[in-house]
């Protein structure tokens, strides 16, 4: 690989490792210094490699430069150095030389501890996601702004406020105590779940970026599985859910970027390997006796990997949604539950239940009603689809619903 | 929005249903609860199995524990759920959908949950 391609590649894989380890060394109050030193390290590579040639071991080169920059920084800034070196002395038996440990084990540990620190309940969840993307995934501010469909200033402000908050709260970069871990893990899983969803459902046109978000969410979840303390059933369930969803990446968008609905997807494009991986982790999730929402959602996603309509499939999906809604209500789950109800118990019953949902500002609600009335009362179906079109926010959504209206004449009403 | 307990009362707790019948009731009950939860009106709830149940009763000023006898009590409680509702009428509408009512003589009791703020 030429250095023009090599440096961006290494930035993707190594920035986050250096940043996490340095954050751990400096403490959460100096998170910017860690970021700056990690960035400067890559700047040095950009300045040096084109003239002196790419070093034999580029990663080792980056680590050495990062270590030296970190040490220089500490020595240069006397007051700062006093404060930090006191902390470091307390943590280490070697008082003479400050050790910046960029071993694989310490990188993983630092990343996991940072994950817990950044997913601290004191900061809003979108800031948790933003900071995680920056520090743990090495995303640029611009990329984060694109993913959130906003601008760089907004993201910068959001991240700045979140860092302030972490400073004020004196959040420690460490593993929570074992009695606290379940509670804190819940926040971490929520953040990873939303990070994945951000990639999966984002309206951003940047397909590669969206798949990257999903891949990063999966990498961080996998990191939790690799650690004894966080290798818990709910983590496997979340990972399984991500695998099942990600398996449909290729099938869910046309070349023109149009969303292809589940029923119309070409299942030969589904990634069999990811489906198998999802099943494996779902199996691992079935330890213990606590059923999390990730267990329920992963099992629903598992059933959705079976494309053939069977009574068994829809009855299972219906009961899973019944349980999921008792744990946590969401309009999407309510709509999907009603769709499953129509498949398991029939359209007539589902129409009665759907009318009670009253989600009248949601275009998916009217799309569902349209679908339920299709073949039963096509005039009502058309009316509902029209309402859905008037509420839909994107051109693609409107086109998808219009197709359903055009197809109405194919369905004979009794 | 108030909270109400919907209490399922069986006329005769000793009646034994076939496993197939139990399965049908279970599904209907789950669908009923799922329908309430889909309206974001479900709070909590549980079934109350008879297995291992005890009755504590005062006899001669002393508590006496027995495995029943549920037979002496005309009605038994099979479970309850707590729902959110704008009015007692809405809570009653939820109760009307409970599959327990398919059994002749069974009933649903709808009770407002006390708010513990002195206003009941």
Image (cartoon, coloured by chain):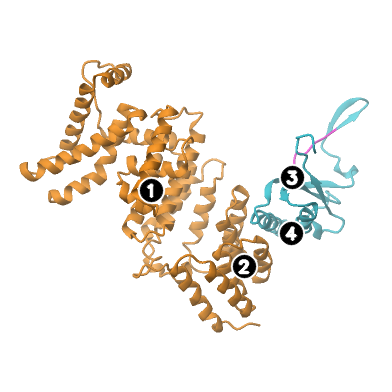
Chain colours: A orange, B cyan
Q: Give the CA distance from mark 4 to mark 3.
A: 16 Å
Residue A162, image quadrant = top left
Q: Residue at x 54, y 51 (%)?
A: A296
CA–CA distance in space, label 3 to label 2: 31 Å
Which residue is outermost to the right?
Answer: B60
| Callouts 3 and 2 in the same chain | no
| SS type, badge 2 | helix
**Position of residue A354 in the picture relative to residue A7 (left or right):** right
User: In the image, what residue occupies the spot 34% across and 60% down?
Assistant: A207
Describe the element under mark 4 as helix, strand or loop.
helix
Q: What residue is disc 4 on?
A: B21
Q: Chain of mark 2?
A: A
What residue is shown with label 2?
A: A342
Q: Which residue is mark 3?
A: B49
Whether labels 4 and 2 share one chain: no
- Observer-side mark, 1 or 3, equals 1
User: Mark 1 and mark 4 in contact (Cβ < 8 Å)?
Assistant: no
Label 4 and label 3 in one chain: yes
Disc 4 and disc 2: Cα gap in Å? 22 Å
Which residue is denoted by mark 1 in the rendering?
A218
Task: For the C terminus of chain A, give its image quadrant.
Answer: bottom right
Q: Label 2 neighbourhood size at 10 Å, few (<14), some (14-19), many (20+)? A: many
N-terminal-most mark, 4 or 3 = 4
**Viewer-nearest of labels 3 and 2?**
2
Q: Which residues are magenta?
A: B48-56
Q: Position of residue B80 (x, y in %)?
A: 75, 47
Q: Is residue B52 left or right of residue A340?
A: right
Q: Does the CB distance between marks 1 and 3 fall below 8 Å?
A: no
**Quarter-of-image position of residue A266:** bottom left
Q: Are marks 4 and 2 in contact (CB under 8 Å)?
A: no
Task: Say which element carries label 1.
Answer: helix
């Amino acid at each position: 690989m030429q250095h023009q391609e090599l440096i961006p590649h290494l930035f993707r894989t190594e920035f986050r490792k250096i940043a996490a380890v340095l954050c751990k060394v400096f403490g959460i109050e100096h998170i910017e210094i860690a970021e700056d030193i990690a960035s400067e390290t890559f700047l040095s590579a950009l300045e040096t490699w084109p003239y002196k040639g790419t070093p034999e071991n580029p990663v080792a080169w980056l680590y050495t430069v990062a270590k030296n920059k970190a040490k220089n920084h500490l020595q240069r800034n006397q007051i700062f150095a006093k404060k930090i070196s006191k902390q470091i002395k307390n943590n280490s038996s070697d008082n003479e030389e400050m050790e910046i440990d960029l071993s694989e084990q310490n990188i993983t540990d630092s990343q996991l501890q940072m994950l817990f620190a950044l997913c601290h309940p004191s900061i809003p969840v979108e800031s948790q996601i933003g900071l995680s993307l920056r520090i743990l995934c090495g995303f640029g501010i611009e990329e984060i702004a694109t993913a959130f469909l906003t601008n760089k200033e907004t993201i910068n402000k959001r991240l700045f406020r979140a860092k302030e908050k972490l400073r004020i709260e004196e959040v420690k970069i460490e593993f929570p105590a074992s009695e606290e871990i379940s509670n804190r893990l819940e926040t971490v899983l929520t953040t990873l779940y939303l990070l994945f969803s951000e990639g999966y459902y984002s309206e951003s046109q940047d397909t590669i970026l969206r798949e990257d978000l999903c891949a990063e969410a999966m990498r961080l979840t996998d990191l939790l599985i690799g650690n004894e303390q966080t290798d818990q059933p709910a983590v496997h369930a979340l990972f399984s859910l991500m695998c099942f969803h990600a398996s449909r990446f290729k099938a869910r968008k046309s070349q023109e970027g149009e969303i292809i609905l589940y029923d119309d997807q070409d299942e030969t494009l589904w990634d069999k390997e990811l489906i198998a991986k999802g099943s494996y982790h779902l199996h691992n999730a079935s330890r213990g006796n606590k059923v999390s929402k990730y267990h329920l959602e992963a099992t629903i996603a598992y059933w959705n990997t079976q494309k053939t309509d069977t009574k068994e499939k829809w009855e299972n999906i219906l009961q899973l949604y019944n349980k999921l809604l008792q744990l946590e209500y969401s309009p999407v789950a309510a709509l999907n539950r009603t769709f499953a109800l129509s498949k398991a118990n029939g359209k007539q019953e589902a129409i009665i239940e759907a009318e009670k949902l009253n989600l009248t500002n949601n275009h998916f609600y009217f799309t569902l009603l349209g679908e339920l009335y299709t073949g039963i009362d096509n005039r009502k179906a058309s009316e509902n689809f029209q309402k859905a079109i008037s509420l839909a926010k994107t051109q693609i959504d409107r086109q998808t619903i219009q197709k359903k209206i055009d197809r109405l004449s194919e369905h004979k009403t009794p | 929005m108030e909270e109400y307990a919907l209490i399922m009362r069986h006329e005769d707790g000793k009646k034994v249903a076939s496993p197939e019948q139990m399965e049908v009731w279970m599904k209907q009950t789950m669908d009923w609860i799922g329908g309430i939860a889909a309206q974001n009106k479900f709070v909590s709830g549980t079934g109350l199995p008879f297995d291992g149940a005890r009755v504590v009763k005062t006899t001669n000023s002393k508590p006496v524990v027995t495995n029943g006898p549920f037979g002496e009590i005309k009605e038994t409680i099979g479970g309850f759920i707590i729902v959110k509702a704008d009015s007692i009428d809405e809570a009653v509408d939820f109760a009307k959908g409970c599959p327990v009512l398919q059994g002749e003589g069974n009933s649903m009791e709808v009770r407002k949950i006390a708010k513990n703020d002195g206003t009941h």
